[in-house]
Image: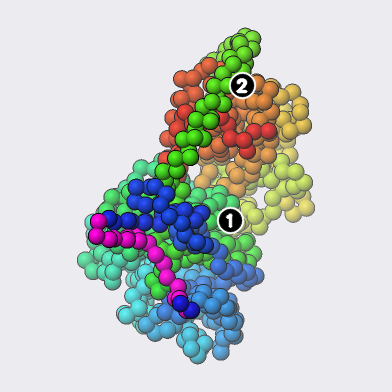
């Protein structure tokens, strides 16, 4: 044959009169194939195992701009359409080419969030903003994708901004439906319907179950009358200052009967992740796909999940995609391309200036789990048994050496006994006390004691507390001149005008200065256009003490003292756990990075020197920064084992695999026996 068309083969069955041979082709590498029983039974020359493309995301495209870009998926045209204020960019993912053209007239909508969609019935691209647009400026406009002429449809705005809302389209009746979102320090659970032809917004009312105010939810249109909403961040009141809850609930909303039905609600406490805005339905319509990620981490990973529509059972699919989510406008979305059988992920990462970068990834559908690609259990050829016998003989030869080694090990029992006693002493200590005068505690519960030892924490309202900590953190940073008014406005009052934010800042700052007059030697000054906290040595703050102790470890100062100080501080609780503002998530992450710079090497060195007590303590510190850190996990388990605390080692293993399951929705791949056998070589010095 000269010309052979591209084809994919799966579930190959070869049948004759007496026998049947089934090849599932679940392999992901090599040339050996296996029959249905898992036995090696054939060879494929130059195979291209397609299962890899259903697990590994491939980056197909990237695009950067100093202007806000709106991006939309146009399946009929097999393209992604991006628009700036003056140009259109059309990326065709079949041939990989991008075409740029200028508009015939100016885009009338001043883009802030870059919200857009393609009406495939009329072949028009819509761009819209719901708030933060100057009076009499357009808020909704559309462009004919053939003529590239813009038409304005509305100048009406909603009363608040709607970051990370959900959008549903009714192209036939020229209507769009918005749900949820965040703005002006408020969360909403409103359904807002915009009629393009009549230029009117309408707030819809629903019966049945109530969805609490939220943003970062996932949305899916099941059919013309029914939509699905999943997860998000919010609380019952809608007031951002009252904290946030990460939801893992699912609702079906019937747009015809105006009723809401709660399908399920998963208990995933401690696993704080949000959903991408646009979810997609599986081919059998029994599950939906979404991307989950911890949005509060500046640098994190998007993970594809499949959730059962009926009961919420979830499966982790594919590998992960990196995302930098420092700005609230950063977003991720999923799109299904039914023509090519692919799933696209679009990541749009914003900077404070509005500059943004778009990355497009693709994976074959249906996506597969890690177990499907890595856990193919094939029976090995008989040569395996010869190898096994050889290994057994070698092990037998080592028995004598091991016996001698064990005798030598007895000499270390006294040292191990002392280390065990120290662990028991530490377990009896109470680290949660926060007594002292002229002091501030930022780990665990927020607390401030005056110079007379009086608890004055109650004087700090949410905004005063945030302003105080913002100035404090910027004052202690290396080479920092303090914090500017612009940063204060962006963190505390992002949706206020500069004039209004300035007034709020001045009032809040005056109140803060009055409160900290209760502290001795502490003052807020304004110099070089920045606010800064100056303090004398008699002022105590656990954040300062933590940074000094970590620095002390790095420059080989008295190690035991610094390690004890770090343990004492982190035992009180998480750093800034009482603050929900996204800006401070970056500060939390930077503190954890300080730990990651120093502690891993300390763990390896202390373990190598057989100081298992110190190894365990360092592992506790590393677990604070990374609860699933494998280096800390292996060294801690092995340290307990060497100290003959075998039951404790098992408890720590069990606690870890439970946490692993909670965070990743997946089982830890190794048994306790496999873990205790050895520490992987790449985790040792």
Q: Does residue 291 show up?
A: no
What residue lies at 53% left-to-right and 56% top-to-bottom? 321
Picture disc at residue 226: none
In the foreground, 195 or 514: 195
Q: Is residue 464 above or below residue 119?
A: above
> Which residue ends up furthest to the front in the rendered image?
17
Q: Is 380 above or below relative to 386?
A: below
Residue at the left extreme, as displayed: 257
Q: Secondary structure at mark 1?
A: strand
Q: Nearer the viewer, residue 375 or 368?
A: 375
- Residue under label 1: 324
Q: Position of residue 204 (x, y in %)?
A: 30, 66
Q: In this image, 25 relative to 362: left or right?
A: left
Say which residue appears at 30% left-offset and 66% top-offset: 222
Query: Quarter of the image containing the C terminus?
Result: top right
Q: Position of residue 162 (x, y in %)?
A: 46, 63
Secondary structure character of the magenta stretch overall:
loop
Q: Which residue is mark 2?
A: 612
First-in-chain label (2 vs 1): 1
Can the viewer see residue 667 in this picture? yes
The reply, left or right, for residue 381 in relation to residue 468 is left
Q: How many marks?
A: 2
User: Which mark is nearer the camera, 2 or 1?
Assistant: 2
Percent x, y of residue 628: 52, 38
In this view, 652 is above or below 141: above
Give the residue displayed 46% in from the left and 35% down from the top: 385
Q: Is residue 21 magenta?
A: no
Q: In terms of image quadrants, where is residue 252?
A: bottom left
- The magenta region covers 3-18
Tell which of 114 and 58 is nearer to you: 58
What residue do we see at 45% from left, 25% from top?
Answer: 651
């Amino acid at each position: 044959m000269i010309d052979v068309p591209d084809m994919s083969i799966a579930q190959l069955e070869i049948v004759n009169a007496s026998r049947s041979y089934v090849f599932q082709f679940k392999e992901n590498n090599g040339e050996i194939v296996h029959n249905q029983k898992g036995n090696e039974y054939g060879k494929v020359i130059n195979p291209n195992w397609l299962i890899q493309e259903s697990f590994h995301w491939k980056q197909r495209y990237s695009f950067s701009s100093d202007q806000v870009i709106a991006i939309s998926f146009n399946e009929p045209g097999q393209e992604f359409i991006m628009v700036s204020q003056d140009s259109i960019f059309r990326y065709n993912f079949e041939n990989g080419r991008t075409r740029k053209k200028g508009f015939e007239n100016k885009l009338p909508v001043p883009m802030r969030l870059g919200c857009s969609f393609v009406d495939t019935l009329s072949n028009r691209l819509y761009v819209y903003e719901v708030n933060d647009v100057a009076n009499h400026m357009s808020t909704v406009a559309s462009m004919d994708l053939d003529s590239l002429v813009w038409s304005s449809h509305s100048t009406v705005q909603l009363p608040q901004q709607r970051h990370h809302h959900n959008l549903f389209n009714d192209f036939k009746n020229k209507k769009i439906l918005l749900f949820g979102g965040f703005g002006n320090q408020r969360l909403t659970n409103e359904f807002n319907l915009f009629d393009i032809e009549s230029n009117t917004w309408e707030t819809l009312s629903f019966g049945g179950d109530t969805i609490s105010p939220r943003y970062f939810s996932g949305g899916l249109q099941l059919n013309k009358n029914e939509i699905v909403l999943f997860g998000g961040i919010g609380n019952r009141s809608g007031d951002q200052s009252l904290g946030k809850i990460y939801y893992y609930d699912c609702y079906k909303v019937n747009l015809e009967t105006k009723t809401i039905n709660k399908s399920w609600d998963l208990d995933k406490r401690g696993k704080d992740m949000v959903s991408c805005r646009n979810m997609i339905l599986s081919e059998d319509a029994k599950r939906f796909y979404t991307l989950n990620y911890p949005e509060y981490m500046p640098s994190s990973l998007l993970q594809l999940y499949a959730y059962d529509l009926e009961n919420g059972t979830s499966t982790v699919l594919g590998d992960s995609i990196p995302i930098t989510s420092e700005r609230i406008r950063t977003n991720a979305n999923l799109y299904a391309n039914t023509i090519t059988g692919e799933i696209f992920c679009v990541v749009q990462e914003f900077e404070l200036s509005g500059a943004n970068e778009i990355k497009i990834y693709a994976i074959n559908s249906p996506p597969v789990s890690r177990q499907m690609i890595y856990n193919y259990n094939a029976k090995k050829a008989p040569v395996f048994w010869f190898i096994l016998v050889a290994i057994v003989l070698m092990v037998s030869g080592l028995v004598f050496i091991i016996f001698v080694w064990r005798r030598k090990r007895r000499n270390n029992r006294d040292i191990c006994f002392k280390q065990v006693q120290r662990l028991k002493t530490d377990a009896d200590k109470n680290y949660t006390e926060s007594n002292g005068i002229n002091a501030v505690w930022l780990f665990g519960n927020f607390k401030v004691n005056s110079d007379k030892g009086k608890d004055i924490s109650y004087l700090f309202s949410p905004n005063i507390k945030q302003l105080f900590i913002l100035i404090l953190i910027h004052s202690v940073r290396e080479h920092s001149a303090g914090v500017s008014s612009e940063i204060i406005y962006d963190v505390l009052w992002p949706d206020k005008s500069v004039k209004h934010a300035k007034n709020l800042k001045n009032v809040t700052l005056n109140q803060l200065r009055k409160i900290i007059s209760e502290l001795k030697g502490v003052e807020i000054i304004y110099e070089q256009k920045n606010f800064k906290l100056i303090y004398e040595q008699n002022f105590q703050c656990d954040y300062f003490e933590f940074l000094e102790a970590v620095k002390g470890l790095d420059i080989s100062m008295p190690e035991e003292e610094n390690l004890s100080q770090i343990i004492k501080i982190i035992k009180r609780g998480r750093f800034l756990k009482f603050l929900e503002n996204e800006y401070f998530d970056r500060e939390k992450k930077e503190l954890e990075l300080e730990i990651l710079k120093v502690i891993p090497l300390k763990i390896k060195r202390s373990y190598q020197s057989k100081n298992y007590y110190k190894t365990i303590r360092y592992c506790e510190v590393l677990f604070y920064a990374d609860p699933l850190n494998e280096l800390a996990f292996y060294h801690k388990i092995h340290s307990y084992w060497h100290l003959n605390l075998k039951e404790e080692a098992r408890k720590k293993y069990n606690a870890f695999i439970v946490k692993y399951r909670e965070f990743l929705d997946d089982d830890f791949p190794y048994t306790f026996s496999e873990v205790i056998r050895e520490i992987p070589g790449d985790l040792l010095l």
